[in-house]
Image (spheres, rainbow, N blue to C red):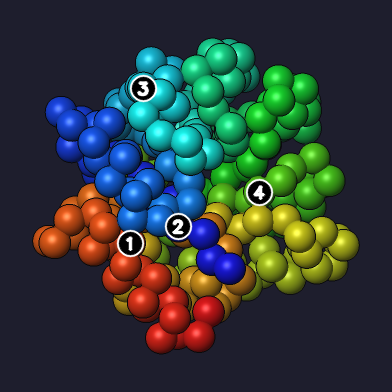
Amino acid sequence: MTLIAPSILSADFGRLAEEVQAVEAAGADWIHVDVMDGRFVPNITIGPLVAEAVRRACSLPVDVHLMIQSPERYLKAFVDAGADRITVHQETCPHLHRTLQEIRELGAAPGVALNPSTPVESLREVVSSVGMILIMTVNPGFGGQRYIPESTGKVERVRALLEEEGRPELLIQVDGGVDEGTAPQVAGAGANVLVAGSAVFGHRDGPAAGIAALRASLLEGGV
Ligand code: DX5
Ligand code: ZN
């Protein structure tokens, strides 16, 4: 089954609890929290305080995506705030194996994210230390961007690498430009967790309609 993880990046922060409760009621599987520091990526968003507010507002898994330099400094703060999953970028972790271990020791599920230009091969040494691979399907920093078409092939290559390494059960998450048009193709390539911000919170008929449209597109796509 393909999971849907709405990103609060595109939510109305003046009504964040309501927005999170709306997507929970509409059948979202996780809440994706995009953390940005204005250094690793050109945008600044939120920190542990907002992750804690999301935790209080719903019972869905809180899936934190750290787009920040030196993420190891904040792992405990996000776990204490209620993060169930923490994904760090390979590009920000010179000691990635140890950082993933620290996330697990803190009790959260570790994930590693790759920017569009980072080769899949860089994952091979950490597939035994991670529960999820996040493939950025846009250049990180902002919601509402266009899906990078080459991402579909990259997801297929990650799926193949996981099979080769005997880890077919690992989750592949995609993030950026996922909507009714791209969801079936990226799920068909092997992604099983879809992050969607603008396609959900920016949907003209509201977030519940956004989730329903994604689910319908996956059904029509046979994935
Ligand atoms: C980094 C963010 C975005 C966001 C998804 O850029 O991670 O990718 O979550 O944004 P949409 O779904 O609006 O492309
Ligand atoms: Zn994200």
* Category of crowding for the residue at label 1, using alpha-carbon neighbours closer than 10 angstroms: few (below 14), some (14–19), many (at least 20): many
Placement of 41 over or under 174, stated as above or below: above
Q: Amino acid at mark 3?
A: Ala
Q: Amino acid at mark 1?
A: Ile
The span from disc 2 to disc 1 (Cα, nearest Å) is 8 Å
Residue 8 vs residue 37, the one in the foreground? 8
Q: Which numbered disc, 2 or 1, marks the residue that appears first in the sequence?
A: 2
Residue highlighted by disc 2: 4
Question: Label for residue 33?
Answer: none
Secondary element type, mark 2: strand
Q: Determine contact: label 2, label 1, CB under 8 Å.
A: yes
Question: Label for residue 53?
Answer: 3
Q: Is mark 2 within 8 Å of ligand 1?
A: no
Residue highlighted by disc 1: 211
Residue 112 vs residue 213, the one in the foreground? 213
Task: Evaluate whether residue 208 shows in this view.
Answer: yes
The span from disc 2 to disc 3 (Cα, nearest Å) is 20 Å
Which x, y percent locates residue 205? Answer: 13, 61
The span from disc 1 to disc 3 (Cα, nearest Å) is 22 Å
- Residue 146 shown left or right of residue 106 in the figure: left
Toward the right, the furthest residue is 166
Question: Label for residue 132?
Answer: 4
Q: Which numbered disc, 3 or 4, marks the residue that appears first in the sequence?
A: 3
Q: Amino acid at mark 2?
A: Ile
Task: Evaluate whether residue 175 shows in this view.
Answer: no
* Category of crowding for the residue at label 3, using alpha-carbon neighbours closer than 10 angstroms: few (below 14), some (14–19), many (at least 20): some
- Residue 203 shown left or right of residue 84 in the figure: left
Residue at the (80%, 68%) spot, across then down: 163
